[in-house]
Image (cartoon, rainbow, N blue to C red):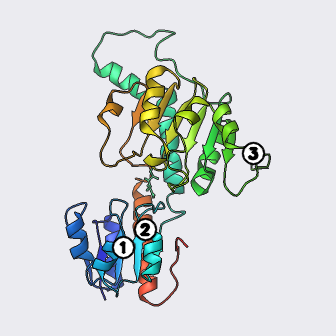
Amino acid sequence: MTIYVSRLLTDRAMAHLESLGVPFRVGGGDPPSRADLEAGLAGADAAVITLTERVDTALLAAAGPQLKIIANVAVGYDNIDVDAAVSAGVTVTNTPGVLDRATADHTFALILAATRRVLDGDRFLRSREPWVWGPRMLVGLDISASATLGILGYGRIGKAVAQRAKGFDMKVLATARSREPGTSEDGVQFVDTDTLLAESDVLSVLTPLTPQTRHLIDAAALAKMKPSAYLVNTARGGVVDEAALMSALHNGALRGAALDVFENEPHIDPRLLDTPNLVLTPHIASAGESTRDAMGILAIDNAAAVLAGKPALTPVR
Ligand code: 8YV
């Protein structure tokens, strides 16, 4: 029995894997190329992979019929063709829950960085221009008590973002597939998507990427937002039409944005780097030390459970 781990996980997660006593091999390449991935998976009984690895029918065939589980070290699993895995008899698991706080924290870091112009201030000082405090200098949006946060996709992470927003006395609106507009819970009011777009001062995109949510935030959706609003995406790049977002920022149709995720990761559209009022981070919303330990350990525990003939802890279906 062998576990294939596509990337070297954190020290604690790797130590946890070693403690299982099951033989394992770690992929090379960081991230592995398609050829590395096929070679690494061949003959493996379980695979612990990350969102940089794409799993499709051909890869499942290359792995061989003994493969029982693909454990994704992420809550999102749009990198995996789940239908293909299920028809090949392979269980797919993700890591829900353990990264909610870290991802919500980073979402708030981006909200504050964008609205309070943290990076503008940093760049300004590093330009070494002489300066003196001024009443109109680097003024941004007050979020405390006066701003409305809109959460597009109120799941576990959305809930954690809403909890943080309460600490800032923000009004919180949200959309969720399972909630009726007009209802509310814990001070969060559920609304339809158009109301969310129209009323948010800060729109937090948290919906998973599916065929239905691809480019959910397109030019038409952006046009429904206030020109004074900010958009923050800590979900998946494909939910937002990057070209439409860039033109909204260039035209002043949106005041600012922050992206942790991109349409064609790891490729960054070079035009993004020249877009004004845009804060960028390289897909690090869950990159807290103990969070990354917990994500790796949960994925490994899923693999171990299935190899031991037990149900997976967190199957995606
Ligand atoms: C990210 C992720 O860090 O688990 C996932 O699916 O992508 C996270 O680990 C975060 O959601 C991106 O902003």
Element at badge 2? loop
Q: Nearer the viewer, residue 150 or 286?
A: 150
Ranked by sequence position, the earlier of labels 2 and 1 is 1
Image quarter in which the N terminus is found: bottom left
Q: Is residue 117 visible?
A: no
Q: Is residue 311 toward the left or the right of residue 52 in the image?
A: right
- What residue sits 67% from the left and 47% below the top? 175
Residue hosting label 1 = 57
Q: Is residue 126 toward the left or the right of residue 237 in the image?
A: left
- Residue type at the position of mark 3: Gly
Picture quadrant of residue 193: top right
- Residue type at the position of mark 2: Asp
Residue hosting label 2 = 81
Q: Is residue 281 toward the left or the right of residue 106 in the image?
A: left
Looking at the rendering, the quadrant in which ligand 1 lies is: bottom left
User: How many numbered marks are there?
Assistant: 3
Residue 55 percent location from the top left of the image? 36, 68
In the rendered structure, are the residues bearing label 2 and label 1 in contact, judged by CB atoms less than 8 Å apart? Answer: yes
Disc 2 packing (10 Å; few <14; some 14–19; many ≥20): some
In the rendered structure, are the residues bearing label 3 and label 2 in contact, judged by CB atoms less than 8 Å apart? Answer: no
- Residue type at the position of mark 1: Thr
Residue 103, relative to residue 272: is it above or below?
below
Element at badge 1? helix
Residue hosting label 3 = 187
Q: Nearer the viewer, residue 215 or 299?
A: 215
Question: From the viewer's perspective, is the residue at label 3 or at label 2 nearer?
Answer: 2
- What residue sits 37% from the left and 60% below the top? 51
Q: Which mark is residue 204?
A: none
Residue 246 percent location from the top left of the image? 42, 30
Ranked by sequence position, the earlier of labels 3 and 2 is 2
Residue 58 percent location from the top left of the image? 31, 73
Residue 166, relative to residue 14: is it above or below?
above
